[in-house]
C-alpha cells in the first residue's frame, strides 16, 4: 500500500510518519492486493486537539475514518481500530457481491474466525425504518445550503441547476459546508 502522509498546522516527523505507516500497514492483511491502493493520512492540530483522518479509495468503496484525541499517537490507534471494524463489517458483503457479479477478484481476504469467539457483525441488523419521497427542485449549491439551514437538517438533496444531476450539500463538523457530486465511471 502506498502512503501519503501530510500535516496541517503540524510538521510530520519521520518518527510520526513511520508510526502511522506501521499502524496502517496492519490493514494490509485484510486485502487481496494492496499494491494499487493509496492510503491518504492527514494529521491536523486545531485548538489543542489532534485529529487524524484517513481515506483509502478502492474500486467501488471508500474506507474513511477520523478521530480526535489529545495525543496524536492515540488518535492514530483509534483510527486504525475504526477502519478494522469497517473492513470486518463490509468484507463479507463486498466479497459476496463481487462473486455474484462475476468481478475478477474480491477486495478482501477471507479471514479465519477470531480466537476470542466473537462473531463478525452481519448486515442483517441493518434496516431502513423510513422512506421519504420528494421532488428535486433545480437550484444551485448556495440555495440548497439555505434550504438545509431553514429546515434545520445536516444535509440536503437537490437537483443541481447547472449540471442537472442529483447533489447533496452537508454541514461538516467544522461548521463549514460540503458538496457531494456524482462521479461517472
Image (tube, rainbow, N blue to C red):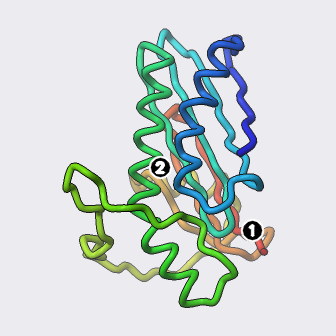
Q: Residue at x 48, y 56 (%)?
A: 155
Mark 1, secondary structure of its residue: loop
| SS label for mark 2 | helix
- Mark 1 or mark 2, whichever is nearer to me: 1
Residue 184 found in image quarter: bottom right
Q: Is residue 40 left or right of residue 133?
A: right
Foreground residue among 95 and 173: 95
Residue 183 tag number: 1
x and y percent of residue 104 in the render? Answer: 69, 81
Q: Is residue 95 left or right of residue 1?
A: left
Q: Earlier in the sequence, mark 1 or mark 2?
A: 2
Please say if 55 is above or below 93. Answer: above
Percent across and percent down for residue 108 are: 54, 64
The residue tagged 2 is: 149
**Quarter placement of the N terminus:** top right
- Front residue of 17/44: it is 17
Which label is found at residue 82? Answer: none
Amino acid at each position: 500500500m502506498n502512503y501519503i502522509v501530510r500535516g496541517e498546522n503540524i510538521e510530520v516527523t519521520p518518527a510520526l510518519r513511520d508510526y502511522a505507516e506501521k499502524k496502517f500497514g496492519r490493514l494490509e492483511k485484510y486485502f487481496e492486493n494492496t499494491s494499487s491502493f493509496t492510503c491518504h493520512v492527514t494529521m491536523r492540530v486545531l485548538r489543542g486537539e489532534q485529529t487524524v483522518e484517513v481515506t483509502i479509495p478502492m474500486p467501488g468503496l471508500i474506507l474513511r475514518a477520523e478521530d480526535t484525541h489529545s495525543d496524536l499517537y492515540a488518535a492514530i490507534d483509534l483510527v486504525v481500530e475504526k477502519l478494522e471494524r469497517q473492513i470486518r463489517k463490509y468484507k463479507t458483503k463486498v466479497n459476496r457481491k463481487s462473486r455474484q457479479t462475476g468481478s475478477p477478484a474480491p477486495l478482501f481476504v477471507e479471514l479465519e474466525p477470531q480466537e476470542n469467539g466473537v462473531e463478525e457483525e452481519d448486515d442483517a441488523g441493518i434496516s431502513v425504518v423510513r422512506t421519504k419521497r420528494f421532488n428535486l427542485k433545480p437550484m444551485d449549491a448556495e440555495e440548497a445550503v439555505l434550504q438545509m439551514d431553514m429546515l434545520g437538517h445536516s444535509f440536503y438533496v437537490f437537483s443541481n441547476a447547472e449540471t442537472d444531476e442529483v447533489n447533496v450539500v452537508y454541514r461538516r463538523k467544522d461548521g463549514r459546508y460540503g458538496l457531494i457530486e456524482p462521479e461517472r465511471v
